[in-house]
Amino acid sequence: MIDVIGEVYGKKIAKQFVFAGALVTIFFLLWNIISVLMPWLADGAWAKDSYNTIFGISVRMSVASLLAFVIAEYQDVFTFFLFKKKFGEKRFWLLSNISNVWSQFLDTTIWTLVAFLGVYSFGNIVGIIIPWFIYKVLMGVLYTPVSYLGIYL
């Protein structure tokens, strides 16, 4: 979607979309932290440990998402416009897919490392990264025609 926004509205607006996405993730992260830190009523204390386990993990996942999103998406905008300058205006599919491959590699690797480092062995982490990266790249290629529709609309 960021590539479509960049293609139609330019680099500045694409960067603003990335910033907005990061801001939403920060609010979600803060909400999770507050929810874990809030005091419990005696009637609900039975659920406290399970709740904190789920939402405590959610905080780590949110931090992983925030870092991966910001780094990968800003890099995606940079790469898209770098290659647009090099290859010209008429090859959106190529620009989008090149920037997508690199940004999805960064996104998947950063997220998985932050989320699971110290939880799983490095071999298991690599075993998580590879199929997710391949899946995300293939989905990016498959939604290229939808991106053209978005540009048209």
Image (spheres, rainbow, N blue to C red):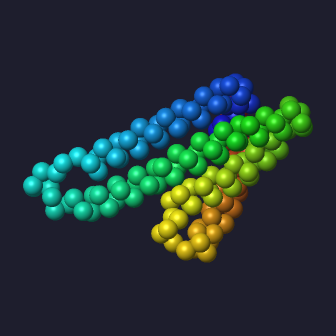
The answer to whether residue 67 is left or right of residue 83 is left
Location of residue 125 with respect to 23 vertically, above or below? below
Q: Position of residue 25 (x, y in %)?
A: 47, 41
Q: Residue furthest left?
A: 42
- Which residue is located at x 53 percent, y 65 percent? 117
Front-most of 44 and 67? 67
Location of residue 36 with respect to 53 vertically, above or below? above
In which quadrant will I find the N terminus?
top right
Quick check: can you spot residue 53?
yes
Q: How many marks?
A: 0
Front-most of 4 and 70? 70
Q: Position of residue 5 (x, y in %)?
A: 67, 31
Q: Position of residue 43 (x, y in %)?
A: 10, 55
- Which residue is located at x 63 percent, y 44 percent? 71
Quarter residue 18 falls in:
top right
In which quadrant will I find the C terminus?
top right
Location of residue 15 with respect to 60 vertically, above or below? above
Front-most of 73 and 152? 73
Quick check: can you spot residue 141?
no
Location of residue 13 with respect to 136 vertically, above or below? above
Q: Position of residue 49 (x, y in %)?
A: 24, 62
The answer to whether residue 91 is left or right of residue 62 is right
The answer to whether residue 40 is left or right of residue 114 is left
Q: Residue furthest right?
A: 87
- Which residue is located at x 29 percent, y 58 percent? 52
- Which residue is located at x 82 percent, y 36 percent? 82
